[in-house]
């Protein structure tokens, strides 16, 4: 069988898709483009209305160019609006997030609404069997990815007023630490040199296990890892970024000097309306502490513009905060009503033109941050991992640079950072 996986949204979705791909490959399925596939799995996002729309457009396009294809849709949009998704052309199954981990069943047969597809027995050394998230069938580069994204947790128990994800992902659920340690060992054996640790609410890791596990314990385990592998901590809520975690990142060569800490807004009034459990002053102090401990770290953030009730004064507060913070990049999201959330019932709504203009302003601030950070790193020699076709690298502090000479993919190299995104190989 020929298959393709199309993924939208966050790193957790990327990690979920890797599990699905591993299950298919370990059973003999062959990856191809969606236009050539017998089966296409679309792993959807639903964080905004545009994410829903992108998923619908993708399914329709695939069905148009590949009329015999069977489409299985999973992810947050499929969980939130299963009937709408089922009505899309060529969709034979809608799989909610609660069943996503078993989307590739652990036997010889994949069942569809219109019959069954026989696959080979799973590879006995695949990470996809048992509790592992991915396997030897997906070595670095096999699915177009050099680094591995490892999901350690899913679900969320928080109640941010704008967010639909607790309803589409459910309550927080952590994977046991021994299983994660086994995952990492298998990933290293498969050749991975960088592993991104991700979760829907990563900071809540271990709270549901009642065995003493926590994010701090997990990070300490990774910080002490003996193999030459780099762990990158994915998006972490500000209140979960403890001094212990910052100190471990600063002290360990195994932990990338890179943190992503969603602020969402710079106005305390807006943060309160969003039900974010911190203030802009708390966030500022946190970033200053990180910058002191990690002067060359990448520190990214997420920002929402156009939240209901956001006036000019609220936006000015956010702009001032962002201009003063020593961040290195921003992800900017125009607010989108999600039916069923408290924010969808909040008024007044912000005019669409104002939302677009505010988004433009914040994106420009983020671009200036990125340029400033790149300029601050020029002339430094940094360790980096070769990615893509071997002509690019990603440094520990998250600079993506073009090399002056091609190397093999998935190699550690020392590079001297040049101007305008260039780098010179030093070894």
Image: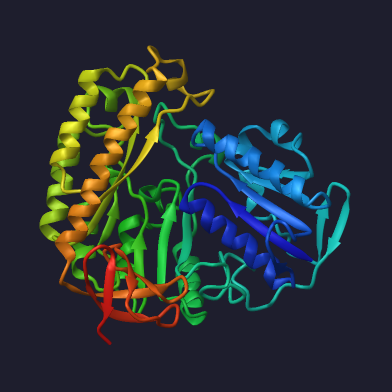
Q: Is residue 297 above or below residue 382?
A: above
Given the current orientation, which residue lies at the most extreme bottom position? Answer: 427
96 sits to left or right of 120: left
On the rendered image, what quadrant is the C terminus found in?
A: bottom left
Residue 227: in sight, yes or no? no
Judge from the rendering whether residue 395 lies leftward or rightward of residue 213; answer left or right. left
Say if 365 sits above or below 37 in the image: above
Question: Which residue is at 22% across, 71% downward?
Answer: 417
Relative placement, left or right, of 410 versus 24 is: left
Q: Observer-nearest residue: 119 or 330?
A: 330
The residue sitting at the top extreme is 348
What residue is rendered at 72% in x and 62% in y? 3
The figure's colour scheme reads: rainbow
Place residue 82 in its image quadrant. top right
Q: Residue at the spot x=17%, y=35% of the render? A: 321
The x, y position of residue 93, in whole percent, is 76, 45
Residue 309, how many percent across, how many down? 33, 16
Image quarter of the N terminus: bottom right
Q: How many marks?
A: 0
Q: Position of residue 43 (x, y in %)?
A: 61, 49
Which residue is painted at 12% across and 48% down in the image? 288
Q: Quadrant of residue 266?
A: top left
Quick one: 20 or 171, which is closer to the camera? 20
Q: Is residue 179 visible?
A: yes
Furthest residue in direction right, as rendered: 115
Q: Residue 57, percent across and down? A: 64, 39
Is 193 situated above or below 419? below
């Amino acid at each position: 069988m020929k298959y393709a996986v199309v993924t939208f949204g966050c790193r957790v979705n990327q990690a979920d898709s890797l599990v699905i791909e591993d299950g298919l490959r370990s059973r003999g399925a062959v990856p191809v483009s969606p236009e050539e596939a017998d089966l296409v799995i679309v792993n959807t996002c639903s964080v905004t209305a545009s994410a829903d729309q992108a998923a619908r457009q993708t399914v329709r396009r695939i069905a148009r160019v590949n009329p015999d294809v069977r489409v299985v849709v999973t992810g947050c949009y499929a969980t939130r609006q299963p009937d709408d998704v089922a009505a899309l052309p060529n969709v034979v199954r809608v799989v909610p997030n609660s069943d996503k981990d078993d989307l590739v069943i652990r036997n010889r047969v994949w069942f569809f609404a219109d019959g069954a597809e026989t696959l080979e027995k799973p590879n006995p050394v695949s990470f996809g069997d048992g509790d592992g998230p991915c396997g030897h069938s997906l070595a670095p580069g096999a699915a177009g990815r050099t680094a591995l994204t490892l999901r350690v947790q899913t679900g969320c128990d928080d109640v941010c007023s704008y967010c639909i994800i607790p309803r589409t992902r459910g309550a927080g659920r952590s994977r046991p630490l021994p299983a994660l340690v086994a995952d990492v060992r298998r990933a290293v054996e498969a050749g991975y040199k960088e592993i991104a640790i991700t979760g829907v609410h990563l900071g809540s890791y271990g709270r549901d296990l009642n065995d003493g596990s926590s994010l701090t314990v997990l990070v300490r385990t990774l910080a002490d890892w003996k193999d030459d592998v780099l762990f990158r901590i994915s998006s972490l809520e500000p209140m979960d970024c403890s001094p212990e975690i910052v100190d471990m990142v600063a002290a360990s060569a195994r932990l990338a000097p890179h943190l992503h800490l969603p602020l969402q807004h710079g106005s305390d009034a807006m943060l309160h309306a969003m039900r974010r459990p911190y203030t802009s002053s708390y966030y500022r102090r946190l970033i200053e502490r990180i910058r002191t401990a990690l002067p060359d770290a990448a520190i990214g953030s997420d920002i929402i513009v156009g939240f209901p009730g956001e006036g000019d004064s609220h936006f000015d507060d956010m702009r001032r905060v962002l201009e003063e913070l020593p961040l290195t990049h921003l992800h900017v999201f125009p607010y989108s009503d999600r039916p069923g959330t408290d924010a969808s019932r909040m008024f007044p709504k912000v005019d669409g033109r104002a939302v677009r203009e505010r988004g433009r302003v914040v994106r420009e601030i983020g671009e200036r941050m990125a340029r400033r950070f790149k300029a601050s790193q020029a002339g430094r020699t940094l360790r980096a991992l070769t990615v893509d076709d071997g002509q690019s690298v990603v440094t520990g502090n998250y600079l993506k640079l073009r090399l002056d000479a091609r190397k093999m993919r998935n190699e550690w190299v020392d590079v001297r950072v040049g101007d305008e995104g260039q780098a010179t190989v030093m070894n």
